[in-house]
């Protein structure tokens, strides 16, 4: 049963009351909004009011309240597209949610719910599949050949690390030798070198000590012996 208003000035649907007031056929000041609200509350107590009817009532009641506020307080500035319209939009959205919830409830109670399963994505893992004519022995030879080709790269890293350590050790040896002796000839120091790398390491150690002003080196002429002595302050 739909709600109808019963006032001294009007009797009928609430929407019709709003249309009469907006058309200035019925003064809003003669309508008691409190009685309108009270009547709707009694209607709710007596009947099972659906959510959409409640939403419609709130929309109309909000508009009536705004119209009466303008009539009673003309100095109050209220935009025609203000809170009343926003509330109406929110109530309509609320009604949509209510309708959707009822639809979902009906589906659930019908026990005819079917959801399609998502397509399973098969991830192909990469794997090495040699030709059937390739034997394990051939694969072994291929891998051994590859490892031999990589040996120089690993050897280079080990040699670089060894040279770094040797430079530090050779700097210590050279510093100790200068403390014990007044001077040292570079050719004598590298006379027992096992390889060219040792000679280069010794020369780098000498340059680093010269940079730190721990020793100084003098060479009279090109290709003459390099004489190393303790640096003077």
Image (spheres, grey):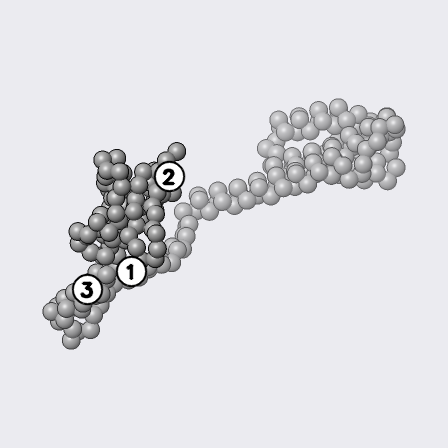
Residue 118 vertical placement versus 66 (above, below): below
SS class of the residue under badge 1? Answer: loop
Residue 224 percent coordinates (x, y): 30, 55
Q: Disc 2 designates what residue?
A: 213
Disc marking residue 148: 3
Asked if disc 1 and disc 2 are in contact, CB closer than 8 Å, the reply is no
Report which quarter residue 38 is drawn in.
Answer: top right
Q: Residues within 10 Å of mark 3 (few under 14, many from 20)?
A: few
Q: Position of residue 203 (x, y in %)?
A: 29, 50
Work out how far the residue at label 3 is from the one at label 1, CA to CA, in angstroms.
Answer: 29 Å
Q: Which residue is mark 1?
A: 125
Check the picture and name the quadrant holding the N terminus. top right
Whole-percent x, y for residue 34 in the image: 75, 24
Q: Which label sits in the foreground, 3 or 2?
A: 2
Residue at screen point 69% across, 33% down:
58
Q: Earlier in the sequence, mark 1 or mark 2?
A: 1
């Amino acid at each position: 049963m739909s709600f109808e208003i019963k006032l001294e000035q009007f009797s009928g649907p609430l929407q019709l009351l709003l249309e009469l007031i907006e058309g200035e056929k019925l003064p809003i000041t003669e309508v008691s909004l409190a009685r309108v609200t009270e009547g709707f509350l009694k209607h709710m107590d007596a009947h099972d009011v659906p959510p959409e009817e409640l939403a419609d009532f709130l929309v109309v009641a909000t508009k009536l309240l705004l119209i009466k506020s303008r009539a009673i307080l003309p100095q109050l500035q209220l935009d025609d597209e203000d809170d009343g319209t926003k509330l109406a939009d929110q109530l309509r959205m609320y009604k949509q949610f209510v309708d959707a919830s009822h639809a979902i409830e009906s589906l659930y109670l019908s026990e005819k719910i079917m959801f399609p399963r998502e397509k399973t994505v098969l991830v192909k893992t990469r794997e090495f599949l040699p030709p059937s004519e390739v034997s394990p022995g051939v694969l072994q030879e291929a891998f051994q050949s590859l490892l031999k080709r990589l040996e120089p790269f690993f050897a280079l890293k080990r040699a670089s690390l060894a040279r770094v350590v040797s430079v530090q050790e050779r700097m210590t040896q050279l510093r100790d030798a200068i403390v014990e002796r007044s001077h040292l000839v570079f050719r004598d120091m590298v006379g027992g070198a096992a390889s060219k790398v040792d000679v280069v390491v010794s020369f780098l150690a000498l340059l680093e000590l010269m940079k730190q002003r721990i020793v100084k080196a003098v060479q009279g002429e090109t290709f003459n012996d390099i004489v190393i002595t303790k640096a003077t302050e």
